């Protein structure tokens, strides 16, 4: 009998909820908000620098040859997801999903894939980890340019078209530190690899800081008066449906296209996930402060759902492999 682990809230999700609660009760304002904003930008820059410093170039080169897999995941992330998001937003009336939350759902669908959880779940499922590292990393690098361009195509940001200043800000906050980390990897790569806890701390603290800033501004502008319980329930339902569509779709496509089981796990976990790490700082740049908190709600909800479902699915993949490996011994 296969034991399916029970999904549960992780510590980071609890911290996210606590941060939203703190912003609701004690929103940051004025000069303090500027100081926290500067601290968040510094933390995000450090985060992407450490990602660049830790990623071995050899793994990227080795994974690049699997072009069919990467092309499929890229198409799912930056073509299929945006179209599904657009279809959902166009279908649901404003009475069920207010405009700001509709923008959040669409923005969610325009983000790149995750890095850490995609790789972790692929490893847990005993899949092709090298391909997962390469695909998720390429998705995040491409997302620095693709997400703002897709936002300009599907959404109106800050009352108009995407500005060059927004692209420059995103490049300065995300791409430049990552490239700098890669360039300095020869000298700092080993140190960064030994201090994984620092990367984890920087990852989570930078997200919490930006979430606190975004929700503080939103609370000052009456966030919870704009989001009735029915709208929150609809966000949860929409996120669940979108994730279910892509989990089922990635499984079906990978099998129909003849990918191995190890590659299937990469396609499932990299092709169905969306990055909160990339989404939070981009939302702060692309959207007005008064709406950034609302826009981030669907992203935060999707983040928790994909972690819970991913953990269960990865364990079932691993149990399936263990069962197959045990067959010759049993016979």
Image (cartoon, rainbow, N blue to C red):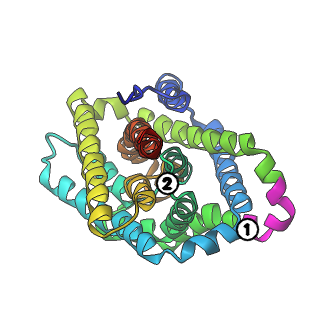
Q: Nearer the viewer, residue 32 or 260?
A: 260
In the rendered image, residue 215 lying in the magenta stretch gets the answer no
Residue 55 in picture, x, y percent from top left: 68, 61
Q: Nearer the viewer, residue 173 or 131?
A: 131
**Which quadrant of the figure contains the C terminus?**
top left
Above or below residue 206? Residue 282 is below
Above or below residue 48? Residue 319 is above
Q: Which region of the structure is painted magenta?
A: 179-190
In the structure shown, which secondary structural element does the residue marked by tag 2 occupy? Answer: loop
Residue visible at 41% across and 75% down in the picture: 68
Residue 169 in picture, x, y percent from top left: 58, 65
Crowdedness of circle 1 by 10 Å Cα count: few (<14), some, many (20+)? many
In the image as oriented, which residue stretches furthest toward the front? 331
Image quarter of residue 238? top left
In the structure shown, which secondary structural element does the residue marked by tag 1 occupy? Answer: helix
Residue placed under numbered mark 2 in the picture? 127
Image quarter of residue 30? top right
Which mark is first along the chain, 1 or 2?
Answer: 2
């Amino acid at each position: 009998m296969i034991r399916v682990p029970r999904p549960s809230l992780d510590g980071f999700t609890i911290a996210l909820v606590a941060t939203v609660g703190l912003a609701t009760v004690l929103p940051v304002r004025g000069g303090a908000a500027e100081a926290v904003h500067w601290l968040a930008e510094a933390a995000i820059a450090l985060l992407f620098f450490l990602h660049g410093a830790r990623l071995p170039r050899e793994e990227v080169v080795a994974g690049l040859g699997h072009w069919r897999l990467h092309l499929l995941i890229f198409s799912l992330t930056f073509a299929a997801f945006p179209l599904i998001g657009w279809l959902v937003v166009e279908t649901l009336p404003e009475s069920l999903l207010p405009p700001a939350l509709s923008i959040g759902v669409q923005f969610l669908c325009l983000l790149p894939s995750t890095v850490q959880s995609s790789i972790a779940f692929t490893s847990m499922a005993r899949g092709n980890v090298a391909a997962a590292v390469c695909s998720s990393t390429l998705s995040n690098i491409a997302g620095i340019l693709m997400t703002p361009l897709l936002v300009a195509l599907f959404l109106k940001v800050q009352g108009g078209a995407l500005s060059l200043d927004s692209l420059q800000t995103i490049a300065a906050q995300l791409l430049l530190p990552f490239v700098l980390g890669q360039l300095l990897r020869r000298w700092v790569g080993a140190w960064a690899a030994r201090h994984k806890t620092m990367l984890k701390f920087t990852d989570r603290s930078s997200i919490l800081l930006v979430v606190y800033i975004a929700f503080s501004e939103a609370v000052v502008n009456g966030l919870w008066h704009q989001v009735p319980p029915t709208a929150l329930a609809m966000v949860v339902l929409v996120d669940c449906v979108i994730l279910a569509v892509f989990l089922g779709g990635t499984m079906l496509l990978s099998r129909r296209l003849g990918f191995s089981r190890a590659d299937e796990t990469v396609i499932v976990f990299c092709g169905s996930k969306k990055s909160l790490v990339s989404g939070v700082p981009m939302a702060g740049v692309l959207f007005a402060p008064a709406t950034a908190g609302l826009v981030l709600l669907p992203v935060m909800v999707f983040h928790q759902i994909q972690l819970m479902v991913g953990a269960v699915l990865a364990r079932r993949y691993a149990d399936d492999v263990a069962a197959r490996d045990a067959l010759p011994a049993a016979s």
